[in-house]
C-alpha cells in the first residue's frame, strides 16, 4: 500500500517567473567554463556559475621578475579576474569557483627541478605561501575553491605530475614531461606511508592554509577517475585527510568518466557509494560527455543530469565546456560553433524549464538555501525502552545536516544502493534505499554491504547487557560490529554460514556489550562484511526486571492531517508513526510553499510542527 497525500487547496496558481540562466532560482548552480580564454556573451543566458578553464591555475598567474621576486598576472589569457568579476555582477545569483590552488600540473616552471637547479624545499615552501597570500589578497571573499587537485596515489604515481608525469584524465596528460617534478609535496609536509597507506600530509597542510585565509569558503578536494578506476582510492584519500584534520567541505568529482556507465542505475549506484563513503557533499566539477553522435550524447546526459539535479547531497554541477570544437576533448560540446544547439542542449533547456523545482540541495552550498540542522528522531516517536526486543527495521528517522555542536551527521542510516532490493513497502517513504524484505518475523534487513549502518535511539535501564542478534548468512563473508554512542561494544561478529547460498535459516548470535548507564543512548549496527541478513535484536540485562522490557509494537498505519500556519487543511496522509508522517511532509514534492506546517494524528490528536525550506 502506498502512502498518500491529498491536496485540498484549490484556486492557487503558481506564478511564472522568467530566469536568464537555465538553473536560476533552482536548488543549486549549473555552471560552465571560459571558452578559449573568453567569457562568451551568452554565458549568462545558460549558466549561473563560472570556472576559468586555465586562467586561475598557478602557472597561469605566478612568475618571477628579473630579480627573482614573485609577480602575479590576474586577468591573463583565460580571464581569472574576469571570471570572478562576471560572477560578482550578480552576487547571490552567479557563482565563481577558483580552480585551483595546488595541482601537480601547470604549476610555475621555476618550481621544476629539471628547469631550475636552485629550487629547494624551502624555496618551494616560500613560493607556495606567497601564492596563497596573493590569491587571498586579490580574492578575499572566494566562495568555492578547488584547494588540491588530482593527488590520488595509484599505480606507483600520483594522479598528476607532483613527481612524475601522469597519464591524466581520459588519457590526456597536461604535465610537462621536461619538468622533472617538484618539491611541492615535501614543502607541504610530505606524504607518510603507514601500513602501505598514503597519509597525504601535504593535502591536509594545504587545506589548513586555505582555511586560515578563507574561513567562510567551501573548500573542495577535486580529482578524476573517481567513478571507475580509482573510486575506492578516492574515497580512502578523503577519509584519510578528514581523519587527519583537513577542513575539507566537499569532494569534487570531475566526472570525465561519466560517459562510461551502461545505464542510469549504475551511475546512481556508484555516486551513492562515493557519497556514503566520504559522508561530505559532492560537487560535479568537470562534467562532459564525448560523443560525436548527437543522440548518444543526449541519451547519456538525459540519464544522468536528473539524478544530479534531484539529489540533495550533490551541491552543484559544472559542465566542462559547451561549444563543440572549443573544449579540451573532442565532441564534448553541447552547442555547435555557430551557436546552434546539439540535441543535448535542446534536452537541457527542456528539462530545466519543466523540472527546475525538482532540484534538491540540503548541503547549504551551490547556491541552495542553507538547511537548518534537524536531529534524527526515534521511529516510534519516543525512544524504545530496553531490555526488550527491537526490530531491525525500526531504526531512527534521519535528520538533516550536521549536529551544530559535534559536527556529526544527523543521518540515521547509510546504504550503498540507490533503491530497496527487498521491495518491502515498510519505510519506503523515509528510507527508500534500505534493503528491507517481508520475511522472517515480519520485515528483515538484507543485501547488506560493508560500510552500511543503522542507528536506533533507545532508552536503556542501567545494567550489564547482552544483545542477541537474530541473523542469517548464506556465504562466508558476513560480519557486523555493534556500537553504543559511536563507541565499539563487544567483538566484531564474523558470521558462520547458516546455509549454502541460502539466507532463510536465522540463528541467535549473542554479543556481550557490557555495562550501559540509564537513559537514552544511540545503538548502532555497522555491517563490516557483505551479505548478512538481520531480523531483530533482543536486549538482555543482568539484574533488570523483565517487566521493563518493551512490549512488541504492532505495525499499523494511521492517518495524519496536515495544516498550514493559518490552519488551512492541506491534505491527509498515511504513515506508521508521526515521525514518519513528518518525514513524508518534508520530502513531499506536492507542497511547494516554504513555511511552518502542522502534522496531527487523526485519532490521537498527537501533533508536531515541521518547517519546509525549498
Image: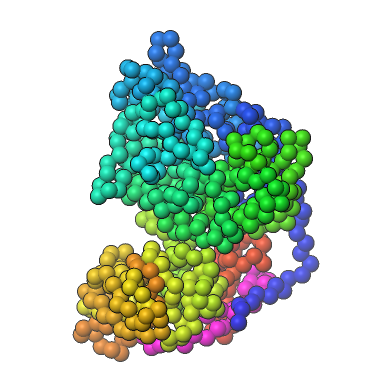
Number of marks drawn? 0
Query: Which of 395/42 is in front?
Result: 42
Q: Is residue 570 magenta?
A: yes
The structure residue drawn at horizontal position 39% and vertical position 23%, both measured from the top left corner, is 112
State the residue in front, 570 or 53: 53
Instruction: Give 465 or 54, whichever is nearer the viewer.
Output: 54
- Report x, y in % for residue 52: 57, 33
Report the front residue among 339 and 510.
339
Left-right relation of 424 to 118:
right
Q: Quadrant of residue 526?
A: bottom left
Q: Residue at x 46, y 55 (%)?
A: 274
> In the image, what residue occupies the spot 43% across and 16% down?
64
Q: Is residue 154 left or right of residue 545?
A: right
Residue 498 location, quadrant: bottom left
Quadrant containing the N terminus in the rendered view: bottom right
Q: Which colour scheme is used?
A: rainbow
Above or below residue 178? Residue 51 is below
Residue 142 visible? The answer is no
Magenta part of the chain: 550-576
Residue depicted at 36% across the width and 55% down the height: 406
Q: In this view, does 159 lie above or below 605?
A: above
**Percent position of residue 582, x then y:** 55, 71
Q: Can residue 175 be seen in this view?
A: yes
Q: Residue furthest bottom?
A: 547
Confirm whether the magenta stretch covers residue 260.
Answer: no
Residue 228 in the image: state x and y as whole percent: 48, 52
Residue furthest out toward the top: 66
Amino acid at each position: 500500500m502506498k502512502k498518500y497525500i491529498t491536496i485540498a487547496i484549490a484556486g492557487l496558481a503558481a506564478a511564472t517567473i522568467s530566469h536568464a540562466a537555465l538553473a536560476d532560482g533552482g536548488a543549486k548552480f549549473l555552471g560552465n567554463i571560459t571558452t578559449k580564454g573568453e567569457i562568451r556573451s551568452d554565458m549568462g543566458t545558460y549558466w549561473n556559475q563560472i570556472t576559468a578553464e586555465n586562467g586561475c591555475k598557478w602557472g597561469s598567474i605566478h612568475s618571477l621578475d628579473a630579480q627573482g621576486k614573485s609577480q602575479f598576472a590576474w586577468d591573463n589569457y583565460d580571464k581569472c579576474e574576469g571570471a570572478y568579476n562576471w560572477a560578482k555582477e550578480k552576487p547571490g545569483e552567479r557563482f565563481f569557483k577558483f580552480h585551483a590552488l595546488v595541482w601537480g600540473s601547470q604549476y610555475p616552471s621555476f618550481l621544476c627541478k629539471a628547469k631550475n637547479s636552485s629550487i629547494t624545499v624551502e624555496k618551494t615552501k616560500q613560493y607556495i605561501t606567497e601564492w596563497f597570500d596573493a590569491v587571498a589578497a586579490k580574492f578575499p571573499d572566494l566562495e568555492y575553491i578547488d584547494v588540491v587537485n588530482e593527488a590520488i596515489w595509484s599505480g606507483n604515481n600520483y594522479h598528476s605530475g607532483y613527481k612524475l608525469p601522469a597519464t591524466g584524465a581520459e588519457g590526456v596528460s597536461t604535465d610537462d614531461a621536461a619538468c622533472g617534478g617538484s618539491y611541492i609535496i615535501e614543502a607541504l609536509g610530505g606524504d607518510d606511508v603507514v601500513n602501505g597507506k598514503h597519509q597525504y600530509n601535504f593535502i591536509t597542510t594545504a587545506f589548513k592554509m586555505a582555511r586560515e585565509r578563507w574561513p567562510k569558503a567551501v573548500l573542495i578536494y577535486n580529482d578524476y577517475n573517481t567513478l571507475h578506476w580509482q573510486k575506492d582510492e578516492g574515497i580512502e584519500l578523503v577519509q584519510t585527510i578528514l581523519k587527519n584534520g583537513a577542513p575539507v567541505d566537499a569532494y569534487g568529482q570531475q566526472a570525465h568518466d561519466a560517459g562510461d556507465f551502461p545505464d542510469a542505475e549504475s551511475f546512481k549506484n556508484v555516486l551513492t557509494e562515493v557519497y556514503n563513503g566520504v559522508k561530505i557533499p559532492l560537487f560535479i566539477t568537470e562534467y562532459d560527455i564525448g560523443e560525436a553522435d548527437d543522440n548518444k550524447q543526449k541519451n547519456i546526459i538525459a540519464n544522468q543530469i536528473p539524478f544530479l539535479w534531484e539529489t540533495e547531497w550533490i551541491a552543484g554541477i559544472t559542465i566542462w565546456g559547451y561549444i563543440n570544437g572549443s573544449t579540451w576533448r573532442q565532441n564534448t560540446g553541447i552547442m555547435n560553433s555557430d551557436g546552434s544547439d546539439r540535441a543535448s542542449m535542446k534536452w537541457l533547456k527542456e528539462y530545466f524549464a519543466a523540472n527546475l523545482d525538482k532540484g534538491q540541495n540540503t548541503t547549504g552550498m551551490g547556491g541552495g538555501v542553507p538547511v537548518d540542522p534537524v536531529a534524527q528522531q526515534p521511529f516510534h516517536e519516543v525512544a524504545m525502552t530496553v531490555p526488550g526486543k527491537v526490530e531491525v527495521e525500526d531504526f531512527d528517522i534521519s535528520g538533516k545536516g550536521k549536529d551544530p555542536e559535534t559536527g556529526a551527521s544527523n543521518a540515521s542510516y547509510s546504504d550503498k544502493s540507490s533503491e530497496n532490493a527487498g521491495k518491502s513497502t515498510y519505510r519506503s517513504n523515509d528510507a527508500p534505499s534500505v534493503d528491507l524484505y517481508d520475511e522472517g518475523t515480519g520485515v528483515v534487513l538484507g543485501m547488506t554491504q560493508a560500510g552500511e549502518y543503522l542507528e536506533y535511539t533507545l532508552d536503556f535501564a542501567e545494567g550489564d547487557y547482552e544483545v542477541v542478534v537474530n541473523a542469517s548468512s548464506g556465504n562466508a563473508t558476513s560480519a557486523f560490529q555493534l556500537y553504543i554512542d559511536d563507541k565499539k561494544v563487544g567483538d566484531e561478529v564474523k558470521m558462520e554460514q547458516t546455509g549454502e547460498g541460502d539466507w532463510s535459516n536465522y540463528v541467535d548470535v549473542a554479543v556481550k556489550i557490557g555495562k550501559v548507564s540509564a537513559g537514552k543512548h544511540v545503538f548502532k549496527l555497522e555491517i563490516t562484511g557483505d551479505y548478512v541478513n538481520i531480523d531483530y535484536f533482543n536486549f538482555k540485562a543482568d539484574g533488570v526486571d523483565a517487566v521493563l522490557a518493551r512490549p512488541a509494537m504492532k505495525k499499523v498505519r494511521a492517518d495524519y492531517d496536515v495544516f498550514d500556519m493559518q490552519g488551512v487543511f492541506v491534505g491527509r496522509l498515511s504513515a506508521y508513526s508521526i515521525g514518519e508522517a513528518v518525514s513524508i511532509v518534508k520530502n513531499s514534492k506536492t507542497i511547494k510553499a516554504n513555511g511552518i506546517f502542522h502534522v496531527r494524528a487523526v485519532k490521537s490528536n498527537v501533533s508536531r510542527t515541521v518547517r519546509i525550506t525549498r
